[in-house]
């Protein structure tokens, strides 16, 4: 039997001298969606070949991968290319649940209840709790909800165990959490493990996009990284503490150092104390990042791209109407179309009208 963080039963079996992996999924999930995504990934050469699935019994049999250590320097280049191919697959089904950092963007009763429960436990000291929710509101207020960026996603790549290297190629495994999601979620979670500086980030994103990323792509990527830090802070502190106060006096490692240990298989996230450390590692990195100029710049860039319509104030000037530059004016256009204002009575002055 092979250890599996998701508590599924995983076995290496031998058939006619060849190794295969038999997995019995014990998580409450949607096996039809799970296996459909896994097969699509396998057909695209992103996941080991699928030989058998049984939806009723939640059983799958796939090729067994004899894993070897994957150097981070190679992961930096090859993983974004792999994610690009994954995200280019025909759309995966949507899921009735979300266990990724984009859960924090899905406003509604489920999110409200979870955040209220987290806040009520007082896991974070008062000042830290206020900081957490202030940063959460800051990012979620500007981060867009656009279907154009929803792609077929793995959604469970914060665990290096789900990224296997056979000495020649990389495989992604464990597709229970796969569904249609924001492309930047997979990108940010993997980058938090393999990217340590701006130069590496440019290599990583250029490999994914096929060209140097523009300012907007870098800004949106940066904000999703912060959303990931918020999410893993919340999730792992909650899971590790069981809702009880934790000891904040002990120092924690730096994020990149901790992820190097995870990458080397030296971290066991099934341990509650380790969960707490992992949550605190993400929290400390978030606190560092929001103090940097790049954070505020990313908020501005993304907000400017996706700003909602502001009230249009039309000021009469000598019988004509002046419009603020670069603002959409759907109400004005509707007024013009109904004949209440004639088009010749206003002055655009570099204003772009859009409906």
Image (cartoon, rainbow, N blue to C red):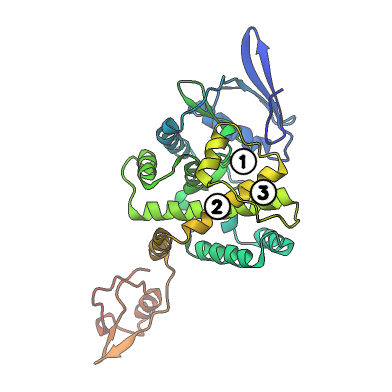
Residue under numbered circle 2 = 229
> Residue sitting at 25 percent across and 77 percent down?
348
| Vertical side of 160 occupied by 120: above or below | below
Q: Secondary structure at mark 2?
A: helix
Secondary element type, mark 3: helix
- How many numbered marks have been drawn onto this rendered protein structure? 3
Q: Residue furthest top?
A: 16
State left or right for residue 172 relative to residue 109. Answer: left
The residue depicted at 75 percent of the width and 51 percent of the height is 242
Report, in whole angstroms, how far the alpha carbon at label 1 lies from the one at label 2.
19 Å
Q: Which mark is residue 177?
A: 1
In percent of width and height, residue 81 lies at 41, 35
Q: Nearer the viewer, residue 333 or 111?
A: 111
Q: Give coordinates of residue 76: x percent, y percent.
A: 42, 36
Q: Residues within 10 Å of mark 2 (few under 14, many from 20)?
A: many
Question: Observer-nearest residue: 276 or 79?
Answer: 276
In this view of the protein, which residue sits in the foreground, 7 or 179? 7
In percent of width and height, residue 324 lies at 31, 78
Query: Residue 276 — which label?
Result: 3
């Amino acid at each position: 039997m092979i250890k599996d963080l998701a508590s599924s039963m995983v076995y290496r079996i031998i058939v006619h001298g060849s190794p295969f992996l038999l997995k019995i999924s014990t998580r409450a999930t949607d096996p039809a969606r799970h296996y459909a995504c896994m097969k699509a990934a396998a057909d695209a050469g992103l996941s080991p070949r699928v030989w058998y699935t049984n939806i009723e019994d939640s059983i799958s049999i796939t090729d067994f991968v004899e894993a070897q250590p994957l150097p981070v320097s190679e992961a930096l280049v090859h993983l974004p290319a792999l994610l690009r191919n994954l995200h280019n697959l025909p759309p995966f089904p949507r899921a009735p649940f979300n266990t990724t950092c984009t859960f924090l963007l899905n406003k509604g009763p489920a999110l409200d209840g979870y955040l209220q429960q987290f806040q009520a436990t007082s896991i974070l000291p008062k000042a830290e709790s206020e900081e957490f929710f202030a940063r959460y509101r800051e990012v979620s207020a500007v981060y867009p909800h656009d279907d154009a960026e929803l792609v077929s996603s793995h959604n469970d790549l914060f665990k290096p165990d789900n990224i296997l290297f056979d000495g020649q190629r990389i495989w992604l495994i464990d597709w229970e959490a796969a569904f249609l999601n924001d492309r930047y979620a997979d990108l940010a979670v993997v980058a938090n493990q393999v990217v340590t500086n701006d130069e590496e980030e440019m290599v990583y994103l250029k490999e994914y996009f096929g060209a140097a990323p523009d300012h907007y792509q870098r800004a949106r990527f940066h904000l999703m990284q912060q959303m990931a830090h918020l999410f893993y802070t919340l999730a792992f502190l909650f899971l590790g503490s069981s809702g009880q106060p934790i000891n904040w006096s002990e120092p924690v490692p730096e994020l990149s150092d901790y992820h190097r240990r995870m990458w080397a298989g030296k971290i066991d996230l099934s341990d509650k104390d380790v969960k707490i450390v992992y949550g605190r590692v993400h929290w400390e990195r978030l606190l560092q990042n929001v103090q940097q100029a790049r954070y505020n710049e990313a908020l501005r860039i993304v907000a400017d791209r996706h700003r909602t319509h502001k009230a249009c104030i039309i000021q009469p000037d000598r019988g004509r109407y002046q419009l603020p530059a670069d603002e959409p004016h759907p109400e004005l256009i509707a007024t013009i179309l109904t004949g209440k204002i004639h088009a010749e009575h206003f002055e655009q002055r570099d204003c772009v009208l859009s409906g």
